[in-house]
Image (cartoon, grey):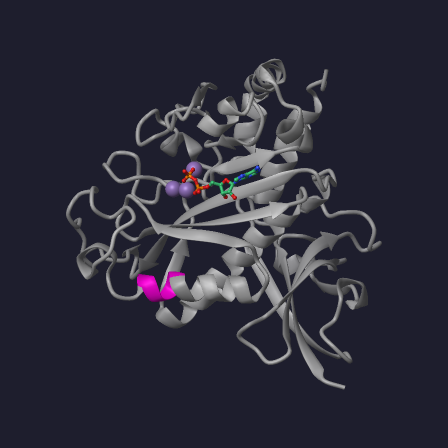
Amino acid sequence: MPKYKLEYIWLDGYEPVPNLRGKTTIKEFDTFPTLEQLPMWGFDGSSTRQAEGHSSDCFLKPVAIYPDPTKKNGALVMCEVMMPDGKTPHPSNGRATIPDDPGTWFGFEQEYFLYQDGVPLGFPPGGGFPPPQGKYYTAVGYENVGSIAREIVDTHLELCLDAGINHEGINSEVAKGQWEFQIFGKGSKTAADQVWMARYLLIRLCEKYEVTVNFHCKPLGKDVDWNGSGFHTNFSTKHMREVGGKKYFEKLMAAFDKYKNEHIAVYGPDNHLRLTGLHETQSIDKFNYGIANRGASVRVPHSFVNNGYKGYLEDRRPNSQGDPYKIAGRVLQTIATVPLK
Ligand code: ADP
Ligand code: MN
Ligand code: MN
Ligand code: MN
């Protein structure tokens, strides 16, 4: 029987931003294992801020499996962290808070910076700045994107697709050294699982380039004219796609307004540095929506209005360090407060 290398991956207990953790176990299977065939596993929670020293075991419950394209018979296993009883979700387990709904679709746009020697790729190593923003977005050319970023983002794309992750696209972003990829999934948890795995693959890939992925939403600070990083969250429920209507839409937006603070609380730390009203953002303490408006909290695509207020909406407030599990959970919690009729 072939031996499979199973890399169990989970989120640790660091706050406000969890880190990805992973460890590998070797098991024999006839063919590539299914989720049901994978055993639970344990780890030392006292080393990940998930337990005290004296009773420190936590459990890993496999929830998604992807082939690891970098290894022969390798698998990447996304896990939820459970309490020692194996049944109760650990407090750090955001995924367990997402209601199961196959009719909900999420599309996440992950922006991030590639960093080397403490500065974004392409910034002068000793300090100072490259030419101002303007030509970096969707750019080509060494002077705009440098020499290794392209290889990293293209390799990352291949790894994701080979792993069965529904990577939907790439673009270089407005700031030098800044990039974006998009992940789309049907089902309330699918895209969120895949974003975490795509982040894992990107961070791991960058190790050999001596590059780090900086997910902070405003790594260069708010006082300079360099864009921050978002995690635009596009969402639709079956009702939004198939029934919709202006009345339902307005009730939905009223609920988003009502719960704006609860949303911001899980939309990633330091968002006040990014949601300033500048650089295609709304300010953090306001909620608004607008048709095709990139300065709004929620952008309503033209297609949504043209189809009789049916389709998906884009919440532009989540930032690049946001946890897609917590974001998806909050969006669905707010939607659940809105009556369908
Ligand atoms: P932009 O940069 O203009 O905001 P992108 O193309 O980067 O747009 O991202 C749009 C996202 O919307 C993609 O991730 C896509 O998968 C997602 N999306 C498209 N249709 C739906 C839908 N019906 N439900 C949820 N997300 C959707
Ligand atoms: Mn985009
Ligand atoms: Mn973008
Ligand atoms: Mn967007």
- Does 201 appear in magenta? no
Q: Quick one: quadrant of the N terminus?
A: bottom right
Report the side of 119 relative to 15 (left or right): left
The residue segment tinted magenta is 149-153
Q: Point out the residue furthest to the bottom here.
A: 1
On screen, residue 167 above or below 312: below
Residue 182, percent from left and from top: 47, 48
Q: In the rendered image, which quarter is residue 245 located in?
A: top right
Can residue 321 be seen by looking at this rendering? no
Q: Does the magenta segment cover residue 150?
A: yes
Q: Residue at x 66, y 46 (%)?
A: 189
**Whether residue 233 is situated above or below residue 144 in the rendered picture:** above
Image quadrant occupied by the C terminus: top right
Residue plotted at (46% across, 31% down)? 317
Image position of 11 (left or right of 143): right
Q: Residue furthest front?
A: 307
Against 107, is 170 above or below? Answer: below
Residue 69 seen by the camera: yes
Q: Is residue 314 left or right of residue 122?
A: right
Residue 156 image offset from top left, x and y in percent: 45, 63
For residue 249, which quarter of the picture?
top right
Tell me: residue 113, above or below residue 297.
below
In terms of depth relative to the viewer, which is nearer, 176 or 224?
176
State whether the magenta stretch is mostly helix, strand or loop: helix
Left or right of 317, for residue 329: right
- Seen at 44% across and 52% down, the residue is 169
| Residue 215, x across and y down, in percent | 43, 49
Numbered disc total: 0
